[in-house]
């Protein structure tokens, strides 16, 4: 939200359209994609936490939360990643028996969709990280 607000203010100050900096500047493009991934992180986290509270799809919820935490770490959101990892550690410490399930239950359509969504968001986070690194090294070489 802060990034989009700053982007809007920059475009107003420069008398440009909203997407002009996004189209012209590769780093801003990647940052915009990262900003647009955050609502998906929030939805995945909320659904996984609700399932953990209701003791449904426990193993899948842990996998989803680990993938979201790793994705947040990859894109540089250390605060969210640390909070998620701390929450997973606390949950594991308080209820170790919940993790005894050996396999993921993918019988329900919502479980498959959630696994696909968390995998897609994780993959996009990896792509954003590599593109940011490539752009940064390219700009540094000039």
Image: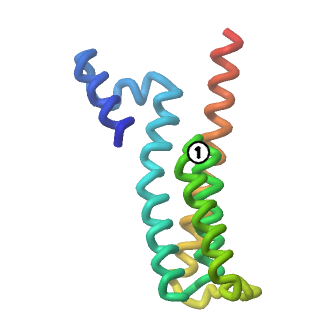
Snapshot quadrant of residue 15? top left
| Left or right of residue 21: residue 141 | right
Residue 118 percent across, percent down from the top left: 57, 64
The structure residue drawn at horizontal position 49% and vertical position 74%, both measured from the top left corner, is 49
Residue 58 percent across, percent down from the top left: 60, 83
Residue 81 seen in the figure:
yes
Residue underneath mark 1: 78
Residue 55 percent across, percent down from the top left: 54, 88
Quadrant occupied by the N terminus? top left
Assess disc 1: are there few (<14), some (14-19) or many (≥20) residues with their C-alpha within 10 Å of its C-alpha.
some
The structure residue drawn at horizontal position 50% and vertical position 43%, both measured from the top left corner, is 34
Q: Nearer the viewer, residue 108 or 23?
A: 108
Residue 68 percent across, percent down from the top left: 58, 59
| Left or right of residue 36: residue 84 | right
- Tally of numbered tags: 1
Q: Nearer the viewer, residue 15 or 84?
A: 84
The structure residue drawn at horizontal position 43% and vertical position 47%, both measured from the top left corner, is 36
Query: Residue furthest toward the front?
Result: 94
The structure residue drawn at horizontal position 34% and vertical position 37%, both measured from the top left corner, is 4
Badge 1 element: helix
């Amino acid at each position: 939200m802060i990034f989009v607000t700053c982007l809007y203010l920059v475009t107003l100050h420069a008398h440009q359209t909203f997407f002009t900096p996004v189209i012209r500047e590769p780093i801003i493009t990647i940052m915009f994609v990262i900003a647009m991934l955050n609502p998906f992180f929030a939805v995945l986290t909320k659904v996984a936490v609700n399932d953990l509270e209701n003791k449904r799809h426990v193993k899948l919820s842990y996998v989803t939360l680990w993938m979201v935490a790793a994705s947040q770490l990859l894109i540089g959101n250390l605060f969210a990643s640390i909070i998620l990892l701390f929450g997973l550690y606390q949950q594991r410490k308080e209820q170790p028996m919940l993790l005894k399930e050996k396999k993921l239950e993918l019988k329900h359509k919502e479980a498959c969709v959630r696994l696909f969504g968390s995998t897609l968001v994780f993959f996009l986070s990896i792509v954003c990280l590599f593109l940011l690194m490539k752009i940064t090294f390219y700009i540094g070489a000039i």
